[in-house]
Amino acid sequence: MSYDLNELAKRVATTLKRQPLTSLAALSRDLRLDRHTVTRALRAHLGKSFREVQDEVLVDFVRTEIARCPTMSIKEIASSVGYNHSRSMARRIRRLTGHSPTEHRKAES
């Protein structure tokens, strides 16, 4: 079966923007596609892996929330993304950007 890889990549990005912590397995299941098909679409259209796209969406989401709601706690932001513990999100954001969410908040103000 042939898929429009461009359209599929857009659907993946849209889903991740709503639910940044969605796993590749869950996303593939929801789309009723093999995970390799999803991965191939992202590589073909964006030149990135699923994890790279997910990481970008997560960082954008956290930065947007920090800018939009400066009084929202990091714990509340982590919860809105889907993390059970804010430390897990903070570690991932620091690994991806080199700065903690708190440091991003200070840079915003």
Image (cartoon, helix red, strand yellow):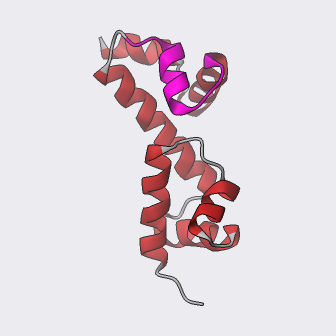
Q: Quadrant of residue 75?
A: top right
- The answer to whether residue 104 is above or below residue 61 is above
In x, y percent, where is residue 30?
59, 62
Q: Find out whether residue 96 is within the magenta segment.
A: no
Most foreground residue, 97 or 29: 29
x and y, in percent, of residue 10 in the image? 42, 64
Res. 29 image quadrant: bottom right
Q: Which residues are magenta?
A: 72-86
Q: Quadrant of the C terminus?
A: top left
Q: Quadrant of the N terminus?
A: bottom right
Dominant secondary-structure state across the stretch colored magenta: helix
Q: Vertically, is 69 above or below 19?
A: above
Determine whether 105 is above or below 37 in the image: above
Q: Give the total number of marks visible in the rendering.
A: 0
Q: Residue at x 62, y 50 (%)?
A: 51
Residue 80, compared with residue 51, is above or below; it is above
Q: Residue 18 is drawn in which quadrant? A: top left
Question: Which residue occupies 48% across, 35% down?
Answer: 59
| 79 part of magenta stretch | yes
**Image location of residue 17, percent across then percent down:** 44, 46
Q: Residue furthest bottom?
A: 1
The residue shown at (50%, 49%) is: 16
Image coordinates for residue 81, horizontal then vertical, percent? 52, 32
Q: Residue at x 51, y 43 (%)?
A: 19
